[in-house]
Amino acid sequence: MKEYFRFLWRCFRLSFHGDWRYYTWMFLLTAVILLGVNAYCKQLVYGLITTGMTDQVSWGLYIANFTFLVGVAAAAVMLVIPVYIYKNDELHDLVIFGELLAVSAIIMCLMFVTVDLGRPDRFIHLMMRFNFPISILTWDVIVLNGYLLLNLHICGYLVYCAYRKRKPSRKFYIPFVFIAIAWAISIHTVTAFLYSGLGGRPFWNSAVIAPRFLASAFAAGPALIILTLQVLRWATSYPVPNKALHTLRSIIAVAASINLFLVGSELFTEFYTQSAHGVSAHYLWFGLGEHNALVPWIWSATFLNVGALLILLTPLGRKLMLLNVACVALIIGIWIEKGMGLIVPAFIPSPLGEVVEYTPTLNEILVCLGIWSAGLLIYTIFVRVTVPVLQGELTYDTIYHTSAEQGHETDETT
Amino acid sequence: MKLPVHKSSGCGGSCGSASNHGVTRRSFLRRTAGVVGGSAAFAAALSPLMDIPEEDRQFDVKKFLQKHYKEMNADEMEAALARVREDVELRYDVRPEIRDIKPMDGVEFVYALNLSRCIGCRKCVHACVDENNQSRDPEIQYIRVLEMPRGTTDIEQGDHHYDRPKVPDEDHYYMPIQCHQCANPPCVKVCPVEATWQEDDGITVIDYDWCIGCRYCEAACPYWARRFNFTTPTIPSDKINTEMSYLSNRPRHKGVMEKCHFCLHRTREGRMPACLEACPTGARKFGNVLDPDSEVTQILRTKRVFVLKADVGTLPRFFYYFDERDPFAQSVPIPGAPS
């Protein structure tokens, strides 16, 4: 136990040390986090009126980001499944970075839900009167927190074993890995059911929402993992084989194709039928009269998604530089499509047919950027301490050669 | 491992004896500057909290630990009511009469609205705001009146913001919409903390002290009946209706939902809702559907009645009808009606 606390303490100290790139990155993230904290404090004082949300469009950027990030978290299974079910070797040493990304994404999700609450001070009411199993939101609370704990356990156990130079005992983590695979599917399915279960919102009330969520998540999530692995390769000496990136590329290509197919099915149903229920889709894709705020967004998303898919499906995707471009395009495209493009139009027009558009405020955007920065900061720290541990440079019986540890050890010996 | 061997102690060989202690003056100064700068930046980030309004400032443990409405016993409810009284006095400088009024036995309320009579004057909208202590700035209204073109009952074609010097307009009819007090309410289903529920008399209520402000109910409602307090509600003191009840018209705080509750502080004591009393044409009818002699029961039996969005399965207790009598209504026996 004492050794475990010493491990945590050393990780904590290590997170304050790095080269100039690390310091610049962390300084920037901290600065944006503080801007976000400042914006959130204003929201706490004046209420959600500091956002662009209204009684007509009562969910906005916060819930859009939340939805996207649940997908990112779920997408960790796209590394876990090849490794633990198909025994893929290239991805074996990288799977932990996917799981750590899942942990960071879930933490961001929880932050996004919290900032969306009108009364975060009444948080404990969730523990005192929990409308389970009737409210899907309570299911979401359970699956998200459960997924967070599962992944924390798996990553924490494996990293600590490496630190202690012990061979991880399979029975302590393999069962959890398999539970986490099913659990990952569940978090995004439950999040989709939050929306698709509402009969009063025809735009959401569609059985294809959950499959669409999973497909887009399994495209955008691994795309984000490819980018983080590229950064890892650039910033550390951790081995990231090209083959691993190309395995992920095929996964993304398949998932992104399925996603476009599902979007197409949705569009056909909405537009061919021409029923009154298609009016939100019409607003999203073509606008309603002079109201067309989302039109440029959804067409950009479509362009980015199709463009990315063309790169991924053709030999172009074998060039790592183009693969990076495709990943960035896909992440942005899917962020728009299932964030702003899925949450906001369901509210427009309102159930009584009133068209009120939504534009996020600067304050709201700053809160979002702050949460994204916090998530990136957490992920950076995870990676910062995990890499030397996995490479056997930071273990219980070694002094890790940074000035931090040297200084620390010297302090103790003098 | 390329990760940097960073010389934060600044002992690139040029330091003197200080290097033995691991902390040099330079690194000490740098660290101190970092801590001071960081704390200052953090304090600056938190500074908007200085503007928290007076009424939100005191932290009251008892209020924080106040139980859910259904779990409070008589004493606890008394204490909760006392806190509301104190809060209203602090915020509006008036002394309210606040009670917790329970449903009556054998009563199920329904509303019936005569579309042949409604002239779209919106008197009901404003009577409701005055009765129920809604925020005036920004103004929250529970009733939305649509101006409908002839030839359709599709509410998507209604005009929400009609502004005429004189109503009714000959080419339109008018359709007021408020909470339909559904028998199968989606808003109740989705609430994660059971802050909203259906009472025995069919009214769906909200415990304003329990709502966490997630707005899931607002997304779930097919009738757009729910309103959120996006900021601290403001009501001039002389506009406060001091006759209040816990589950209905007591003043709300920012960050919680509210909606029409059929004026339960009036209707549970045999009076009519404020919107009905304000209506100049008698288009609004309200009463107990379990009472065979009530006016609403007669209307449901004898008029051609419809509900909005019957396809969503919410079973509204808010009915619309036209003046015309159903010619076959005679054959339906109505208890108590003259034969």
Image (tube, coloured by chain):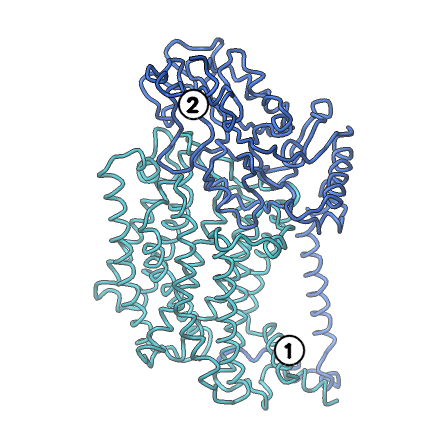
Q: Which mark is residue B300?
A: 2
Q: Which residue lies furthest to the front in this view?
A: B339
Question: Where in the figure is residue B203, as x and y percent of width and height?
Answer: 55, 34
Q: Residue at x 46, y 52 (%)?
A: A136
Q: Which mark is residue A9?
A: 1
Question: Where in the figure is residue B130, as x and y percent of width and height?
Answer: 63, 23
Q: Which picture quadrant has residue A371?
A: bottom right
Q: Which residue is drawn at 70% across and 54% down?
A: B43
The kind of residue tagged 2 is: Leu
Category of crowding for the residue at label 2, using alpha-carbon neighbours closer than 10 angstroms: few (below 14), some (14–19), many (at least 20) = some
Q: In this view, does B240 lie above or below B51?
A: above
Question: Where in the figure is residue B20, as x and y percent of width and height?
Answer: 72, 86
Q: Is residue B135 visible?
A: no
Real-space CA distance between mark 2 and mark 1, rounded to the nearest whole angstrom:
73 Å
Label 2 and label 1 in one chain: no
Chain A, hue in figure: cyan
The kind of residue tagged 1 is: Trp
Q: Which one is in front, A334 or B226? A: B226
Q: Is residue B87 above or below residue A139?
A: above
Q: Which one is in front, B47 or B335? A: B335
> Which chain, by letter, is blue?
B
Q: Residue B171 carries which label?
A: none
Disc 1 is placed on an element classified as: helix
- For the C terminus of chain A, the quadrant is bottom right
